[in-house]
């Protein structure tokens, strides 16, 4: 061990795990708190560290893109989680997608094998003394978030986020769904594509926009995380909104017709064995029975069995530009914040109540 001061890290997600492993690599002892499995959230499914609750894609690897450039920089900086993500990589075209379970297991093993990290499976309700990093994420426990708000002052911010459903691979009709990446040869590629005719798309869109939702409200643009808007919310903007977005058929050829489909839902593998696929771009706020009914209207998914339904949840975060300094510290303290609890959207609006918690 070392006589250096121990740092407390709260939250065993992506940011907390990265922080703990990086500090340990610098010779700094860490106490890493993770409340799961005793206390979980609406979005989590397991107890592993660095669980990906939404997409299993970490976006582009192409250096010419912003996401790819960031990965290049993280590689040069020796990011432990990026290294582990590449070890758990599964085919996804030009994106870095991972097998969720393999990735989470790898991060959990790396943390547990590090002698300078003490993993504590407890919920933290009070801000710890001494040097501390709060990386509890946007699903931070209510008591800790309230305490953090009292310390920081200012208005709480929030938006709604959503995850897409996952279907069992052997329930996908491969006589309809075909493997192809955009502009690739039909019969090959990392994605499965479910092609629509014009009439099929109209029928599907009609049911999608009229289906029963869990959160019964009309959302304003700033209420939703723009990168993960529920598919039905996008669809409500018009019949072609999804068809020019997540369901664009550009670069695809339906081998049954030899032509480009009117629209297409893409499926991306969830794991290395490709035993399950997620519906790309189909984050949703629909009730589970409605997801089963409406998404089975997608050609090729008529008999789909759902390994996991999509969920919507509210993310809460701090107004980082106004309450944290340039190093993401609370000015004049040893308290820092990391990860999505700092916020991800550019100019979110305060909670309507304007108090903590939202």
Image (cartoon, rainbow, N blue to C red):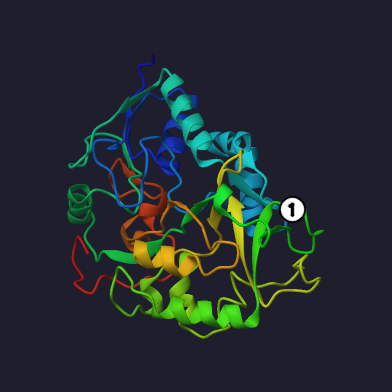
Residue drawn at x 46%, y 63% is 283
**Label 1: how many residues lie within 10 Å, few (<14), some (14-19) or many (20+)?**
some
Which residue is at a point 40% across and 39% down the rendered structure image? 16
Residue drawn at point x = 36 percent, y = 21 percent: 4
Look at the image and tell me whether residue 77 can be seen.
no
Residue pointed to by mark 1? 189
Q: Is residue 132 left or right of residue 101?
A: left
Side of 37 relative to 236 (left or right): left
Asked whether the viewer can see residue 329, the reply is yes
Which quadrant is the N terminus positioned in? top left
Query: 63 or 123: which is nearer to us?
Result: 123
Rendering coords of residue 145 (x, y %): 23, 52
Q: Vertical placement of 325 versus 161: above or below?
A: above
The one nearer the camera, 32 or 107, is 107
Q: Is residue 68 left or right of residue 132?
A: right
Q: Residue furthest top?
A: 1
- Residue 104 x/y as whole percent: 47, 36
Q: Position of residue 69 (x, y in %)?
A: 66, 52
Number of marks in the rendered image: 1
Which image quadrant is residue 50 in? top left
Image location (x, y in percent) of residue 78:
59, 34
Dividing the picture into quarters, in which one does residue 76 lie?
A: top right
Relative to residue 241, is residue 179 depicted above or below?
above
Quarter holding the C terminus? Answer: bottom left
Name the residue rendered at 36%, 44% in the picture: 135
Question: As rendered, which of 40 and 358 lies closer to the eye?
Answer: 40
Question: Who is closer to the viewer here, 68 or 53?
Answer: 53
Q: Secondary structure at mark 1?
A: loop
Residue 312 in the image: above or below residue 70: below
């Amino acid at each position: 061990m070392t006589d250096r001061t121990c740092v407390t890290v709260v939250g065993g997600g992506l940011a907390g795990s990265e922080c703990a492993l990086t500090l340990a690599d610098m010779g700094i002892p860490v106490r890493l708190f993770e409340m799961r499995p005793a206390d979980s959230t609406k979005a989590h499914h397991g107890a592993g560290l660095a669980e990906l609750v939404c997409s299993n894609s970490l976006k582009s690897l192409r250096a010419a893109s912003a996401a790819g450039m960031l990965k290049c920089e993280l590689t040069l900086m020796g990011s432990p989680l990026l290294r582990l993500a590449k070890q758990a990589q599964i085919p996804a075209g030009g994106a870095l997608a991972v097998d969720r379970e393999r990735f989470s297991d790898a991060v959990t093993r790396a943390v547990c094998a590090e002698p300078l990290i003490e993993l504590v499976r407890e919920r933290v309700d009070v801000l710890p003394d001494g040097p501390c990093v709060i990386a509890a994420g946007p699903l931070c426990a209510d008591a800790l978030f309230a305490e953090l708000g009292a310390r920081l002052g200012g208005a709480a911010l929030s938006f709604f986020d959503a995850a897409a459903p996952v279907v069992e691979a052997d329930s996908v009709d491969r006589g309809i769904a075909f493997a192809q990446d955009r502009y690739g040869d039909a019969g090959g590629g990392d994605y499965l594509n479910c092609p629509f005719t014009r009439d099929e798309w109209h029928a599907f869109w009609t049911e999608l926009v009229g289906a029963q939702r869990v959160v019964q409200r009309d959302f304003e643009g700033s209420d939703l995380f723009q990168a993960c808007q529920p598919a039905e919310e996008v669809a409500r903007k018009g019949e072609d909104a999804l068809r020019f977005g997540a369901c664009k058929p550009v670069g695809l050829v339906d081998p049954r017709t030899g032509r480009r489909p009117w629209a297409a839902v893409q499926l991306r593998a969830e794991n290395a064995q490709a035993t399950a696929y997620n519906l790309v771009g189909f984050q949703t706020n629909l009730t589970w029975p409605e997801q089963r009914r409406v998404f089975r209207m997608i050609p090729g998914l008529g008999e789909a069995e759902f390994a996991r339904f999509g969920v919507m949840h509210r993310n809460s975060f701090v107004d980082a530009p106004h309450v944290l300094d340039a190093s993401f510290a609370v000015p004049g303290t040893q308290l820092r914040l990391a990860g999505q609890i700092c916020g991800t959207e550019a100019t979110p609006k305060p909670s309507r109540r304007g108090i903590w918690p939202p």
